[in-house]
Amino acid sequence: MSYTVEERGNPNSLSYRLFFKNADGKYISPFHDIPIYAEESKNIFHMVVEVPRWTNAKMEIATKDLLNPIKQDVKKDKLRYVANVFPHKGYIWNYGAIPQTWEDPAHKDGDTGCCGDNDPIDVCEIGSKVCSRGEVIKVKVLGILAMIDEGETDWKVIAINVEDPEANDMNNINDVRRLKPGYLEATVDWFKRYKVPDGKPENRFAFNEEFKDKDFAVEVIKSTHNLWKDLISQKTSAGKVSCKNTCVSECDSPYCCSAEAAKAAVDE
């Protein structure tokens, strides 16, 4: 399945939105309609790229908006950008999310002791290519970091694009240490300090800042997929999260959105 994106509004503005379409030209939700798996038997997952490497605009899937387009995060009516925290420049990986996952804010994680952050699970893609905003890529999971952000569990999956030249040589987190020395340490440092310029304290981490391996990461992803299933089937309260979509077969009529209604929403 291939996907395209459609920009509305101007970049670096409050009105900017990036909507997604499938191969049939139908508007879809990147949160709900893109399958979690690209190849389930090999644990290859889809990743929606929100922030290309080296950029600073804090872009994210708008979980509360109809059809969940990508937009720039806003705080106190101002667009958010991450600071360049020496020696880093912007985001140091392609940053995004795995669709059809959800970190439930009412579910206390058994490993971290903290509830979820109400978003799809985050991915740091460490390949050599600088991806484009809205690109949907296939990734191999290598490990995971458990960040605790203002008391919430905020998992950070470490993955690599399956088309990257080094993908065949990377199968677990220790391969990252071997082939990209210093990258994991830089990742912890980035997440620890990126909010400090905004006057916030350093973030902390579970497991003494240690990365868990691939098997652990895959189980966390599967767990958040199950939490998403509960969300989309209305077994869990959605709160302000928009579950409107055009493709998910499990959804009942309150969450289904016709192609005509989706287009009308985009054109508003």
Image (cartoon, grey):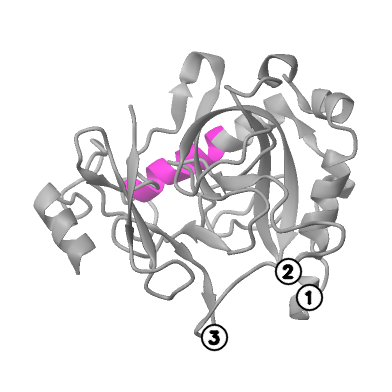
Quadrant location, the N terminus: top left
Disc assigned to residue 83: 2
* For the residues bearing labels 1 and 2, Cβ distance under 8 angstroms: yes
> Residue at 56% of width from left, 54% of height from top?
107
Mark 2 neighbour density, 10 Å: few (under 14) some (14–19) many (20 or more): some
Q: CA distance from mark 3 to mark 2?
A: 17 Å
Instruction: Quickly name the residue at label 3.
Output: 76
Residue 69: quarter of image: bottom left
Q: Secondary structure at mark 1?
A: helix
Instruction: Quickly name the residue at label 1.
Output: 197
Residue nearest the viewer, comparing 249 with 159? 159
Is tag 1's residue or tag 3's residue first in the polypeptide sequence? 3
Q: Is residue 228 magenta?
A: yes
> Residue at 13% of width from left, 48% of height from top?
259
* For the residues bearing labels 3 and 2, Cβ distance under 8 angstroms: no
> Residue at 67% of width from left, 46% of height from top?
156
Check disc 1 and give the amino acid type: Pro
Check disc 2 and give the amino acid type: Ala
| Coordinates of residue 97 in the picture (x, y in percent) | 53, 45
Q: Over which residues does the magenta segment extend?
A: 222-232
